[in-house]
């Protein structure tokens, strides 16, 4: 059996879970009395842990195998999401309040991130193992596309389950990853990465690439910056919709889910075009960041749900191009022996972005609801200058 369908299914399950969390987190936070900045703190703290754990899981996948690492990540997501949802249940029932509730939610999400951080580097390294250099951008595009399918399915499932309450989607997401973990355990073969490693000369002095490795560093800068921008928009979207459109928490969750769904659909469409036409990493990056900038400008002027949806189409299209662009570029910069380590670094880029983005976005939102959109539009300019300076070093 080809490993590709199960590999993509695992990525899709992760996307379903993450989208459900972000669709319900803002209204859930307000239901239990958390401020916007406190909701941002939950995401930032968990992202800090994720960025610490992801490279370590990437290196671990070289020792224990991609398959086993992926199973750990999926089961960790299941367990962590269950604990996180139960923390909110304690807040809604009044068992925990104030600082104790916030601390419990932060710790639960950090616990979840420690384990679920195993899945993204395992899937990225697995894809690198089964693709040639020429196929690498297309392979990473398939992973991003699978994630976007998950973020399309996630809001739809979340909306159906939300009729049973805002916690039902979280428990549903845990069930999805549990079922996926079973099928990965049962049917996914181990990656052929050991054969690739055996054919490669040893790394000098046993060193593996880190964040400051000059081969990888430029692409880490682009990846982290991409997710800072995206997380600023994503994390403030629920507050923006609720305040701008004057709707209740359940309607907010529905509209946020729809906005994230069209965002993911646009991302998926652009990735399908890029994979079909075999766009190089350079073109993916040069196309992605201007689209994100345009989306943030449209969001600044948004006055209704349709305007918000149009803005998220642009943001999704840009993210869908830039994400596989920096991932493929980093993967092509190193040898087969180093793919696990680089996959861990690449997988940590979203988490590093989510350390800064949610806190910056929610803090800016408390100053002015449009401040996050201005921040994203302005921050894209130096990234375009940086891309220009990289020039032909981009593959």
Image (spheres, rainbow, N blue to C red):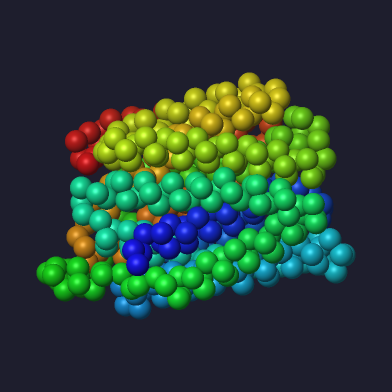
Whether residue 363 is situated above or below residue 15 in the rendered picture: above
Residue nearest the viewer, comparing 29 with 3: 3
Residue 39 at what x, y percent from top left? 69, 52
Above or below, 296 against 107 in this view is: above
**Residue drawn at x 55%, y 24% as measured from the top left:** 297
Identity of the residue furthest to the front in this view: 1
Q: Is residue 114 left or right of residue 238?
A: left
Identify the residue at image location x=19%, y=60%.
335
Q: Residue at x 82, y 40 (%)?
A: 248
Residue 31's x, y, as percent?
82, 52
Residue occupying the point 66% across, 43% down: 257
Q: What is the quadrant of the C terminus in the image?
A: top left
Report whether residue 215 is seen: no
Q: Nearer the viewer, residue 152 or 242?
A: 152
39 sits left or right of 145 in the view: right
Residue 359, x across and y down, in percent: 61, 47
- Nearer to me, 25 or 49: 25
Looking at the image, the residue that sits furthest to the bottom is: 64
Task: Check the image and report above or below for 102 versus 265.
Answer: below
Residue sitting nearer the eye, 274 or 23: 274
Figure quadrant of residue 320: top left
> Percent position (x, y) of residue 279?
28, 36
Q: Quadrant of the N terminus?
A: bottom left
How many labels, in total? 0
């Amino acid at each position: 059996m080809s490993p590709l369908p199960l590999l993509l299914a695992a990525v899709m399950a992760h996307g379903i879970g993450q989208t459900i969390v972000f669709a319900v987190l803002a209204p859930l936070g307000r239901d239990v009395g958390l401020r916007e900045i406190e909701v941002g703190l939950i995401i930032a703290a968990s992202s800090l842990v994720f960025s610490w754990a992801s490279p370590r899981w990437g290196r671990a996948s070289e020792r224990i195998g991609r398959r086993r690492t992926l199973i750990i990540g999926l089961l960790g997501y299941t367990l962590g999401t269950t604990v996180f949802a139960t923390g909110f249940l304690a807040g809604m029932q009044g068992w925990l309040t104030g600082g104790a509730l916030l601390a419990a939610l932060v710790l639960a999400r950090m616990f979840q991130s420690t384990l679920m951080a195993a899945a993204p580097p395992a899937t990225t390294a697995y894809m690198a193992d089964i693709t040639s250099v020429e196929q690498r951008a297309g392979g990473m595009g398939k992973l991003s596309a699978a994630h976007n399918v998950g973020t399309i399915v996630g809001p739809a499932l979340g909306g159906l389950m939300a009729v049973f309450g805002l916690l039902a989607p979280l428990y549903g997401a845990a069930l999805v990853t549990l079922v996926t973990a079973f099928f990965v355990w049962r049917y996914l073969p181990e990656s052929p990465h050991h054969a690739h490693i055996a054919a490669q000369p040893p790394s000098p002095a046993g060193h593996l690439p880190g964040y400051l490795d000059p081969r990888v560093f430029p692409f880490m800068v682009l990846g982290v910056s991409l997710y800072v921008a995206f997380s600023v928009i994503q994390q403030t979207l629920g507050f923006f919709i609720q305040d701008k459109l004057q709707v209740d928490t359940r309607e907010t969750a529905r509209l946020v889910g729809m906005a994230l769904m069209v965002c993911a659909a646009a991302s998926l469409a652009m990735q399908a075009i890029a994979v079909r036409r075999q766009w190089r990493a350079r073109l993916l990056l040069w196309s992605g960041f201007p689209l994100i900038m345009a989306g943030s400008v449209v969001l600044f002027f948004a006055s209704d749900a349709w305007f918000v949806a149009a803005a998220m189409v642009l943001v999704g299209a840009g993210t869908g191009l830039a994400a596989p662009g920096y991932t493929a570029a980093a993967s092509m910069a190193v040898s087969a022996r180093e793919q696990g380590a680089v996959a861990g670094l690449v997988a940590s880029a979203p988490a590093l972005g989510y350390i800064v983005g949610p806190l910056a976005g929610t803090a800016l939102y408390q100053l002015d609801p449009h401040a996050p959109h201005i921040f994203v539009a302005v921050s894209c300019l130096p990234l375009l200058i940086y891309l220009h300076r990289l020039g032909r070093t981009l593959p």
